[in-house]
Image (cartoon, rainbow, N blue to C red):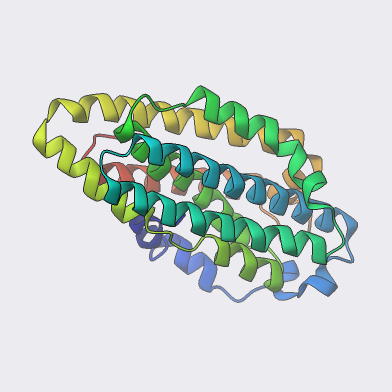
Amino acid sequence: METPDNAAGHTGDATEHDAAEPTGIAAMDWTAASADPQYRAAVVDLLGALAYGELAAFERLAEDAKLAPSVGDKAELAKMASAEFHHFERLRDRLAAIEVDPTAAMEPFAQPLDDWHRQTAPSDWLEGLVKAYVGDSIAQDFYREVAARLDSDTRALVIGVLNDTGHGDFAVEKVRAAIEADPRVGGRLALWARRLMGEALSQAQRVVAERDALSTMLVGGVAGGFDLAAVGEMFTRITKAHTKRMAALGLAA
């Protein structure tokens, strides 16, 4: 799920990064890049994590629709859930095309993501909207950063499944309207969003730490990967994007 602020954030530092002439693996297609077994393993992990994330997003949006205050809101969330499931199908099909069992690729990420959703279960409609806008977008920011280092075929797929489902604009409109109607709501939602930020970053670090191929790629063990300084810069950009999203919602970061 792309949000307006994801898109805006990529007109600055990230765009300059993305616009640089591709080198190393980023200049290769999948056939050439996958000759490196460590890189192949990292991509399988990445696609597995992203696929399960999209499947979980579909399930969550369907659940959130039950909390929607109007029939129109239910219909909007149902449409977004359908888009998330289509993204999942693309990732599942890609894993199958490179001769990987999609279920096996997703399995290592099911428990951590399920834990994250249990730990951050919203108590009402507005908390659900903020969770989707803030929590999911942190993950999307991470995937966009990683995508810049992927082979051209995998990069195109990852960017494609991060396309906007409309949830960002929808969440901003509904949350800002609620705060305008009752300013006290803003304080509660700001605390909730800060908790989501902390939980999301902790969960991401846990997942990466447990997957050797993925963590090696991120810190530069695979040609074209990030070095440690670049990882720090990446998380700084993700934090800045979060601050922008909070402002869009009318909340203090």
Left or right of residue 224: residue 101: right
Report the number of numbered marks: 0
What is the residue that sits farthest to the front in this orientation?
71
Q: Residue at x 78, y 46 (%)?
A: 103
x and y, in percent, of residue 68 in the image: 32, 39
Q: Residue at x 67, y 46 (%)?
A: 49
Left or right of residue 18: residue 96: right
Q: Residue at x 68, y 30 (%)?
A: 111
Near-viewer residue (96 or 156): 96
Residue 120 seen from this side: yes
Left or right of residue 42: residue 249: left
x and y, in percent, of residue 235 in the image: 51, 43
Left or right of residue 8: residue 214: right
Q: Is residue 46 above or below residue 22?
A: above
Q: Is residue 121 above or below residue 30?
A: above
Quadrant position of the C terminus in the picture:
top left
x and y, in percent, of residue 40 in the image: 83, 58
x and y, in percent, of residue 128 in the image: 38, 35
Q: Is residue 152 above or below residue 207?
A: below
Near-viewer residue (180 or 138): 180
Q: Is residue 206 above or below residue 103?
A: above
Residue 227 seen from this side: no
Q: Residue at x 70, y 56 (%)?
A: 225
